[in-house]
Image: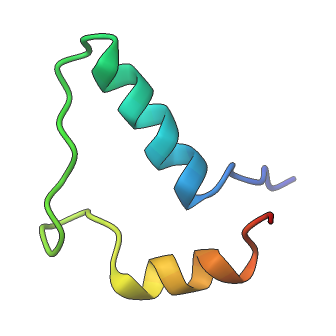
Amino acid sequence: MKSKSKGLYANIHAKKERIAKGSGEKMRKPGSAGAPTAGAFQESAKTAKK
């Protein structure tokens, strides 16, 4: 059984909340390893809730 992830925007929002609470994490810069690509944002926009 495969679990469905929350999605790109939900993950970004959750990380920004953790950072605001003082987790010490940092957002990755565009183009760095592991950062979402422009294509990832385009794919995510197809299923985004209005």
Residue 28 left/right relative to 43: left
50 vs 44, left or right, is right
User: Is 24 rendered above or below residue 26?
Assistant: above
Q: Residue furthest front?
A: 50
On the image, which quarter does residue 20 sit in?
top left
* Residue 32 relative to residue 14: left or right: left
Q: How far across and how far down the image is residue 17, in percent?
A: 43, 25
Seen from this angle, which residue lies furthest right?
A: 1
Which of the 4 image quarters holds residue 35?
bottom left
Instruction: Look at the picture and state if 41 lies above or below 42.
Output: above
Residue displayed at 15% across by 75% down: 31
Q: Residue at x 61, y 74 (%)?
A: 44
Residue 23 as seen in the image, left or right of residue 26: right
Check the picture and name the quadrant holding the C terminus. bottom right
Q: How is the image coloured?
A: rainbow
Residue occupying image coordinates x 50% and y 34%: 14
**Can you give x and y, in whole percent of width and height, for residue 43 in the image?**
59, 84
Query: Is 36 placed above or below 24 here?
Result: below
Pick the residue in front: 8 or 17.
Answer: 17
The x and y percentages for residue 12 are: 45, 47
Q: Where residue 22 sits: x, y (%)?
A: 24, 11
The residue at 79%/63% (across/down) is 49
